[in-house]
Image: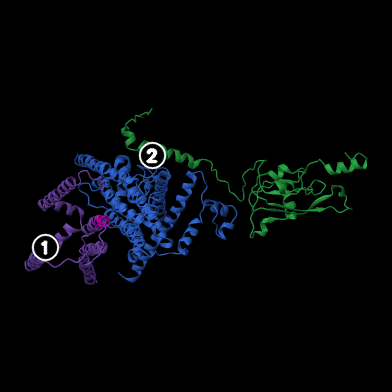
Chain colours: A purple, B blue, C green
Amino acid sequence: MIDFFFYLFAFLTLGGALLVVVSRNAVNAAMFLIVSFLGMAASFVLLEAYFLAVLQVLVYAGAVVVLFLFIIMLLDTQGGERKAFKMLPGVAAGFAFVLLIMGVLSIFGSDALTDADSASVVATGSSLKAFGYQLFTTYLLPLQMTGFLLLVAMIGVIVLSKGSGKGGKEDES
Amino acid sequence: MDITALLIVLAKALAVVAVLMGFCSYAVLAERKVASWIQGRIGPNRTSLPVISAIPLIGPFLTRLGIFQPVADGLKFLFKEDPVPGHVHKTYYFLGPILALVPALVTVTVVPFGRYIDAEGVVSPLMLANIDVGILFLFAVSSLGVYGIILGGWSANSKYPFLGGIRASAQLISYELTMGLSILPIFLWVNAPGTEGTMSLFRVVEMQSGAWFVLWQPLSAFIFLIALFAETNRLPFDMPESETDLVGGYHTEYGGFKFGLYFVAEYGHMIIGSGVVTLLFLGGWNPLPWVTLADVAGWFGADFHIGITGAVLSVLIFLGKLCALVFLFIWVRWTVPRFRYDQVMRIGWKVMLPLSIANLIFYAVLIAYLDTR
Amino acid sequence: MAKVLERKPLTLAERTYLPQILSGLKTTFRHLIKKKVTLQYPEERPPISDNYRGIPTLVKDPEGREKCVSCQLCEFVCPPKAIRITPGEIAEDAPTAHVEKAPQEFEIDMLRCIYCNLCQEVCPEEAIFLQDIYSFSGYSREEMVFKKEKLYEIGGTLPDRHFKWEKKRLAAEHGNVH
């Protein structure tokens, strides 16, 4: 039963992700992105990481894709013409893909997965309190770095929009 | 899970959804009636059923109250011609109303609407699924409801619905943060040190057997209520619909049953929202601040707070508060004019968001002081 | 001379909108519990003033004699030409034979009538009156041309006590015609 659901949700996630990439229509792509996120959230539920699952839906499916749709609708991107294949991006994409595969394989090859006992998985996944505790002790540095990265991105956006939009009409969104 | 247990769960879910739908249709009636009364009119008072309306005294009274009007409204939506304009994007045009309604119905699963105390004194909530991350689940699913509006507006492939859809997406993002931040102080207080961490709404109500949260966190309640008005697209924040400047907003191109679904979804969100406000700030099924149902039973020297009667009473108290809040929604709608779109954005980002962050910091410090004293 | 109106800046309370919204809520709540002004139309009718100009009809006098003497003044004065009278003579052996004339046919086209009251004003016999009926309908154009019978049926009897023609008859019997 669990296996069946895992394959179902994995299929939803991967299939959705694939369709995001190949969709010509930007709105279609955004909708498939939601499907992919929901599949991922369901996979989290299977892992009993309810908090993560709910956050996945709340933040990504609920807010980020809404923003995507907002931008898509504002820019009115219909279709888009086919670009000629270029050598450099192709090589870069291939390189990134190989890197990703190697990373996954290396994790599988190491003992990291088998060593983690189920108790710690529960502690970081389902219990809210343990989750918060882990986040602010063990993983404090990654958390701070992520926050810093987001701050940098935000400042960048503000600088860019202020710089180009001088004298333009006020955009409140 | 064997088949009988599954059937019982299914029956419970169907019952709750049926009650919710009933509430939706009567919320529509309440809207029409209150609107009429506020405008010095009488409102729907003609629709009658063959047998019930013939009962002397009661029948005419119910007819005058418009009790049978939702039946007529529902049938109208069902049997009206449901045209599909030629220029729409078919898939999303059909998907829109469904995506609007489904989240509204799904959120009801984590809303506790009463409690049951058995003979041993064990308190258990009356709800479909008592999950640990209740309020987050509710927010997550209800935030998906906006896709119905966005897709409806986009798929209609015409100006006004499109603008309505864009406004809906911008408004949702602007107010969701505020909404989430405004309830954090409550969960900071509920998850006091030494207790099991939870985000269940049932636990929140249990914590309000003393002071209701609205009494000592009025600003949180106020911010949450305003964000709720914005999230449910009710006046003065009904940007996506704004029938005066956008014709009908996102549902301009919809008619018949599909429009009916949008209509029900709007009221569904409103009712669930009222229920959440009741649970978070108004003490859920506690009749008065500092007074629980058990205290009331103690005054009478009876024990009607346990067992079935207690459960029914708790549900009734909860529904009473919910109805009062729905009335507030309607009352505000027929009082306040719509904000301009830029005003909505300014209030959302420049007023409500800083206010909610300040509120969070203030109560975080206060609660930290109270908890560590 | 142009006058510049200085607008005072909004106070903090005004900028939160809240006092205004609360006072608005108070106002609407007052209306909520106030007596309603709706009239339940088919059951309740609005009061109609005495000089209301509804549909024009013919009337009879208390003795049941039709008052119209088919002088055709109303037909002449009618701006939309809604009235059509076919004059006729009263039979020699009738008790009111000295009136000499009565309408053989009297039609008012209600689709043309503009309810101007000129027919009532011009009538020397007080035979045509505008009633207080403001709502009537029919399925065809022919049905909306009211015939004499229908006009008398709606108009009924005018309870005046002039008895002009009866007095004339009595005077004639006593020998002084004028």
Q: Is residue C130 left or right of residue C89?
A: left
Q: Quadrant of the N terminus of chain B?
A: bottom left
User: Which residue type carries mark 2?
Assistant: Ile
Range of magenta residues = A68-75
Report the predominant secondary structure element of the magenta stretch: helix
Q: Quadrant of residue A113?
A: bottom left
> Depth check: C129 or B43 in front?
C129
CB atoms of marks 1 and 2 within 8 Å: no
Front: mark 1 or 2: 2
> Depth check: C156 or A57 in front?
C156
The image position of residue B62, as x and y in percent, is 54, 53
The answer to whether any part of residue C79 appears in the image is yes
| Figure check: B44 above or below C29 | below
Q: Circle 1 — which element?
A: loop
Q: Which residue is mark 2?
A: C21
Q: Quadrant of residue B366?
A: top left
Q: Is residue A73 magenta?
A: yes
Label 1: how many residues lie within 10 Å, few (<14), some (14-19) or many (20+)?
A: few
Q: Circle 2 — which element?
A: helix
User: Which residue type carries mark 1?
Assistant: Ala
